[in-house]
Amino acid sequence: MSETVIFDPLVPWAVLAVLALAAAAVVALALWRGLSGWWLRGLAALALLAALAGPSLQSEDRTPLTDIVIAVVDESASQRIGERPSQTAVALARIEAGIAGLENTELRVVRMGDGPDDEGSLLMTTLAEAMAEEPRARLAGAILISDGRLHDVELAPDLPAPLHLLMTGREEDWDRRLEITTAPAFAILGEPVALRLRIENQGRVPEDEAGRVEILISVDGEEPRGFDVPVGEELELPVTLSHPGMNVIQFQVPAAPGELTDRNNEAVVQINGVRDRLRVLLVSGEPHPGERTWRNLLKSDASVDLVHFTILRPPEKQDGVPVTELSLIAFPTRELFLDKIDEFDLIIFDRYQRRGILPSIYLDNVRQYVENGGAVLVAAGPDFASARSLYRSPLGEILPAAPTSRVIEAPFLPRLTEIGRRHPVTQGLGGAGEDPDWGRWLRQVELDPFGGEVVMTGADDGPLLVLDRVGEGRVALLGSDHAWLWSRGYEGGGPQLDLLRRLAHWSMKEPELEEEALTATAEGQTMTVTRRTLSERTGPVEIEGPGGQVTVLDLEEVAPGRFQATFEGPEIGLYRLDQKDQSAVIALGPQSPREFEETVASGAALEPVIEASNGGIRAIEDGLPGLRQVRASRPAAGRGWIGITPRGAYVTADVTAIPLLPAWAWLLLSAGLAVGAWLREGRR
């Protein structure tokens, strides 16, 4: 119950003020003239003014509300290091016991994990959200149980009560961290790219750990190589990528004795290897409509450097024109097929036949070029079935099919084979299916395959497109020179550009067109595993996590030759995938997790916020402080104790107002005082 005096004036306060000034003037005049009843006159005027002010006694029936203390428990990744979980549990139990011993006080416990998208520890955001759910008038204090490493101190809320930090960790803690300072997302194959990194020590570092350390570097999960490097200096490491696609480079520093954690002793960099320019040599044996198709395809790709030669005048042609008067460019056979052949990524023979222009030794050099990792694509016309066929040269040793010398001059519809529906070169080709909706071709060289994979068939279900691997290289044989009919829209046309582009890029070993491949992509902590294969089924994939734990993941077929599954990584780091002869590596999470940038406990970041609220920072290892109540604006922390401020909040259940005196009593009092003044002055 609370009682207060309130006023409900009968006239405006301005009028009452004027009347008060007039009454004061009259009393002052009476005093100046020496009237003995001046004080009675003043009391009479005061009684009249009080009556006009309407004083009442207001009584409130109040229900007191409990004070609220918020405890934010930091359960982020850095709080799971060493003894910090047990320190946190002991501190929280002490707070709960302390609050239970205080009257009219409640505790709200809020637990905080890692911030989304590697945002780190969001202590202030969590505290602000907890405060928003409670009435501000009831907040008596807030206590943080944390290592003090937060990443949103600039979002600290305006606290109406003390804020305290119970800090986990030990004074003698130290840690070593590997940081990647510069890492490109893309790099050109064969050219060195600079990676910059730093190894730094934090906390109370032992003297014998302040010099040089060993760093292990592994590419794509291979056996790591060790290097001795200094601590505290930025290092520049030149790296040359060896294959196109994603290259995963792992850096690791072995854990030292007494170090807080080894979670920040390694970093993973993923660099996408791209070719600077794809160099293609196109040799056309004679002018024909399909020649322009090949040229347009390769010239339309900005990443392709094309060298194109068309044999317009074969050696056997005798028309009597002197050679000195010809404006044709001499075919630089020696330069292309001996000196600079290794500079090309792909050689295309388009309706080429042996005419003595390329001696057998040059074609044998092409064969060796393929076996050593090069690529050849043969687009065969009627010439391939003749006695001058490339098959009857040293190049025939690497071709996957032999011509039967028969040329089929009849319309036919190209179709995908069962393997063709699973092969990346032809899988999902527009218009493909059991009954393709593309146009027909009009000529095919009959082939007798003895190697490779037949991915397309033509007339009489004979092989039309055969793909094969030879040594380290690749060979593609297209048994028709009428693919250009699709680009001309004959009978509706077809995906000619798409097919030829895939053929060229498969020959140049683009990772996206590998028929046998195990790949993984990541979005956050979710990994999508994809297995491409020519087989009708595939087995499970073994996934080895950063801590060595192995998970077996079953894959489901999502398209012919393509199997997929998703996997939720339990922690950030490098994962290795294995399935028979296929393997892959992928990194989940950031290359340098923000939560492990600084692991040694410190209250420096929170100190300004806590001092502004009169709170305190106490290390748990020094002993847990007691809890007491202090008045507002007073220091709320001392040796061995921290304090909260009682707020005295309440809810008003009922309000009653009773006039101090009835109107007639005020009038009688005023009149009596006035008569008393008159009588006193009259007797005088």
Image (spheres, rainbow, N blue to C red):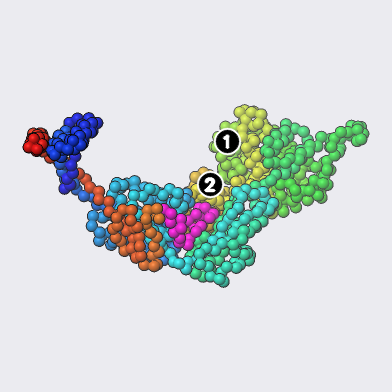
Left or right for 455, reference 290 = left
Q: Is residue 274 visible?
A: yes
Q: Is residue 410 magenta?
A: no
Is the stretch drawn in magenta largely helix, strand or loop?
Answer: loop
Label 2 and label 1: CA atoms lie apart by 17 Å
Residue under label 1: 430
Q: Is residue 603 magenta?
A: yes
Left or right for 16, reference 249 = left
The residue under the point 13% across, 39% down is: 36
| Depth order, front residue of 395/628 | 628
- Picture coordinates of residue 288 (x, y %)? 75, 32
Q: Secondary structure at mark 2?
A: strand
| Depth order, front residue of 359/178 | 178
Residue under label 2: 562
Instruction: Please give the range of residues in magenta.
Output: 587-609
- Picture coordinates of residue 601 (x, y %)? 45, 61
| Depth order, front residue of 556/245 | 245
User: For mark 1, does the 10 Å Cα neighbourhood hold few (<14), some (14 to 19), or many (20 or more) residues?
Assistant: some
The residue under the point 40% across, 60% down is: 617
The residue under the point 41% across, 49% down is: 156
Left or right for 610, reference 473 = left
Residue 91, above or below 646? below
Q: Residue furthest front?
A: 684
Whichever of callouts 2 and 1 sits on the residue coming sooner in the sequence is 1
Q: Secondary structure at mark 1?
A: loop
